[in-house]
Image (spheres, grey):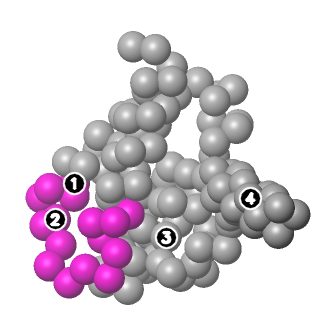
């Protein structure tokens, strides 16, 4: 499998997991054990060079998931520890911590400003 495909599949699954656990009360622990096991296997297949580039984004996405899990399961729960094993850096302070701007969002905002500037010029 091509590296880009592995990165995409890991990221898509991590993002879906974050969304699944976000402020959720009725967590399906059996499904989550399987899901996190698959995430860990996919994470382990990513080369260190790729992880060096994407680990901060992983820390943010899984960090928000960890914060959601802590609210529901508690700090010392094995599920929290399992997800935390894929993180390396500083984690978001809450499940709602979206401080980092995404590159595509910055680009879109610049395009919108440029378009407005052009409209005013005409």
Dot 3: what SS? helix
Q: Is residue 30 magenta?
A: yes
Q: Sequence order check: which comes first, mark 3 or mark 1?
A: 1
Q: Decide which of 9, 80 is in the foreground and name it.
A: 9
The image quarter in which residue 41 lies: top left
Where's the C terminus, which quadrant? bottom right
Task: Quote the CA–CA distance across marks 4 and 2.
Answer: 48 Å
Judge whether 64 appears above or below 38 on screen.
Answer: below
**Can residue 80 be spotted in the picture?**
yes
Q: Which residue bears the numbered disc 2?
A: 29
Q: Sequence order check: which comes first, mark 4 or mark 1?
A: 1
Where's the N terminus, which quadrant? top left
Q: Which residue bears the numbered disc 3?
A: 64
Dot 1: what SS? helix
Q: Sequence order check: which comes first, mark 4 or mark 2?
A: 2
Q: Which residue bears the numbered disc 1?
A: 33
Q: Which residues are magenta?
A: 18-33
Q: Are marks 3 and 1 in contact (CB under 8 Å)?
A: no
Q: Are marks 2 and 1 in contact (CB under 8 Å)?
A: yes
Q: Which is in the foreground here, disc 3 or disc 2? A: 3
Q: Decide which of 102, 22 is in the foreground and name it.
A: 102
**Can residue 117 be spotted in the picture?**
no
Task: Quote the CA–CA distance across marks 3 and 1.
Answer: 18 Å
Q: Are marks 3 and 2 in contact (CB under 8 Å)?
A: no
Task: Quote the CA–CA distance across marks 2 and 1.
Answer: 6 Å
């Amino acid at each position: 499998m091509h590296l880009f495909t592995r990165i995409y599949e890991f990221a898509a699954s991590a993002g879906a997991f974050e969304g699944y656990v976000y402020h959720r009360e009725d967590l399906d622990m059996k499904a989550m054990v399987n899901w996190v096991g698959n995430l860990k296997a996919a994470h382990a297949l990513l080369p260190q060079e790729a992880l060096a580039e994407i680990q901060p984004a992983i820390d943010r996405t899984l960090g928000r998931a960890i914060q959601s899990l802590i609210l529901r399961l508690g700090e010392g729960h094995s599920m929290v520890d399992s997800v935390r094993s894929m993180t390396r850096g500083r984690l978001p302070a809450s499940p709602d911590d979206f401080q980092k701007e995404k590159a595509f969002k910055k680009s879109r905002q610049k395009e919108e400003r440029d378009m407005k500037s052009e409209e005013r010029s005409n």
